[in-house]
Amino acid sequence: MQNYSRAVGVGLVALLGAMVSPVRAQGVPVQLLDLQDSDTTLRVAGELGIYSGMDPRVTQLQSLLYFGVAPSEAFELTIEWAPGGTILSEQLDFFGIASTNKARFTPSNPTVTAFYRHRDGDLQLRLGAGIALPLTFVDETDNDAVITEAISLTVRTATWGAWDIWILAPERLSFVLPFQLEARLIEQLALGTDLGVGFMIPLESAADPIYSLQLALWLAVVADPIMVGLRMHTVGMFSPAGDPQSNVALAPFIQADLGAGFVYTRFLVNVGDGMYGDTDLLWSVTVGGGGDF
């Protein structure tokens, strides 16, 4: 039993490393320029998403917490952490292995990122470097628990379309380099781009490192205090030992400015035959909010 469990666990780690091995989980909310002024010194945000997909269908809740501190106009420090995901489905199936859901708390990798930021009129640039601490792990002592965690981690990354996937890479220390550019073209039109590179280093020397490259573009119509837009992103995963993997996701979103606070919602769909296969429509709905102080 223990050998079988370990084999499944090792297979899971290999799968997540090569296939879906978050912090802006698409996610930290789209940044309204109106909220990013020089008086902002603290941002606190959180979100809760529900995901449905795979075959047989799996339904899961996912959460994210975000903290940002800006001691000066040019410097910002952020912490992103996904406290956990809860699978709501009772019966599970992981690549033909049936299991009964054993909900477990699987911590994510808290990601700390330092940003240099520059604002020039309606143009804002953020360039950062960060580290994701290796707190995500797989419990190999129980077969059903291993399968539950395998599905849970996979689904949690699918909730965000594989964006910032290092947040949930099991037993890996990750170094990340994010770049974000946002602009208000005219008073009623805003756009932005996100670019990120991740280096996921295994804690075990026998495993291979995983590299990720992600790119997002978004466009939104602004009718203060409401922003309505569409975001598209693609994520590529590379490993010396495996074939490249990729995923594409589309996410219409709505965000509202509430003075010092904001709320938002998005509907994300993973499209094409990507990391999560083409067995069924893979979608998630997320709501969140926060405030600037």
Image (cartoon, helix red, strand yellow):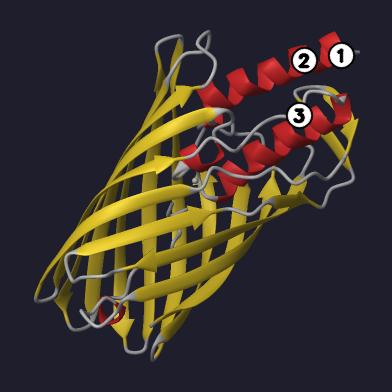
- Measured as percent of width and height from the top left, residue 282 is found at 61, 46
Question: Which residue does the numbered mark 1 point to in the structure image?
Answer: 2
Indicate the amino acid at tag 2. Answer: Arg
What's the distance in space between the residues labelled 2 and 3, CA to CA?
9 Å
Q: Residue 6: give its label.
A: 2
Labels 1 and 3: the sequence-earlier one: 1
Farthest-out residue, left: 120
Which residue is denoted by mark 3 in the rendering?
139
Image point 35% across, 68% down: which residue?
69
Q: Is residue 83 visible?
A: yes
Say if 272 sits above or below 290 in the image. above
Q: Residue at x 24, y 72 (%)?
A: 190
- Given the image, on which type of amino acid does mark 3 rest? Asp
Q: Which sits earlier in the primary sequence, circle 2 or circle 3?
A: 2
Marks 2 and 1, Cα distance to the nearest angstrom? 6 Å
Mark 1 secondary-structure assignment: helix
